[in-house]
Image: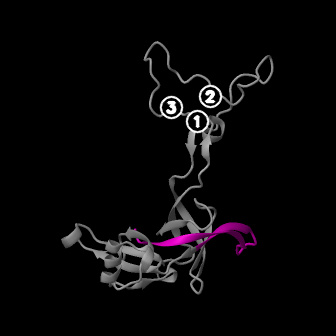
Amino acid sequence: MPGLLGKKIGMTSVFSADGKNVPCTVIEVGPCVVTQIKTVDVDGYDALQLGFQEKKEKHTTKPMSGHFKKAGVTPQRYLAEFKGFEGEYKLGDTITVDSLFAESDFVDIQGTSKGKGFQGVVKRHGFGGVGQSTHGQHNRQRKPGSIGACSYPAKVFKGMRMAGQMGNKCVTVQNLQVLKVLPEHNLLLIKGSIPGSKGSTVIIEK
């Protein structure tokens, strides 16, 4: 699906037509430049590679510098491929937020969730804890309890919900509504929350 790269700015709220206060997320979307055009004849599929946020030449590797010079654009910090763009685009073309999105559209947003570090089963999986808090129990309230291994099958099955790393994963939230488009500032106001911390890079697809 066609889409653009953006940066999460933060959250705010707006009033709807019927007077309700709706929480929303502000995203700076684009402008994105076309850095590569992939075709069926050459690459086996049709897609556009888009770049977002300029960076200095000295921070770019030699192979990527040649890639950007071939496209006739300045080095870009983030790259992503999108399929399904309508119309013809050339290398170096700029795609803005208002050329792709409009109010009341529904989008899918992909980002990296906030990292929570190593967490136990109560926070990570919503366990209720085991045992009572009295009658000699002093350190078992937030433990996972039995994990099922015994004489047979004498192993712990894969996928067992246990303590471990939580967050810092690629998360996609689908069917979020676009409340407002502010093309003069390259901003989208999306209803609800999206994954990631402030300043993180996200992918917005129609």
Q: Which class describes the residues within 10 Å of circle 2: few (<14), some (14-19), or many (20+)?
A: some
User: What residue type is disc 3 on?
Assistant: Met
Pointer 3: what residue? 160
| Residue labelled with disc 2 | 144
Residue drawn at x 35%, y 79% is 68
Q: Position of residue 116 (x, y in %)?
A: 62, 48
Q: Taking 115 as reference, is 118 above or below it?
A: above
Q: What residue type is labelled 1?
A: Ala
C-alpha span from label 2 to label 3: 11 Å
Amino acid marked by disc 2: Pro
Residue at screen point 32% across, 76% down: 67
The rendered magenta stretch, by its main secondary structure, is classed as strand
Read off the magenta span: 1-27
Q: Residues within 10 Å of mark 1 (few under 14, many from 20)?
A: some
Which residue is more in the foreground, 24 or 150? 150
**Membership of 66 in magenta stretch:** no
Q: Position of residue 103 (x, y in %)?
A: 57, 77
Report the Cα–Cα distance between label 1 and label 2.
8 Å
Q: Is residue 89 visible to us here?
A: no
Q: Is mark 3 on a helix, strand or loop?
A: loop
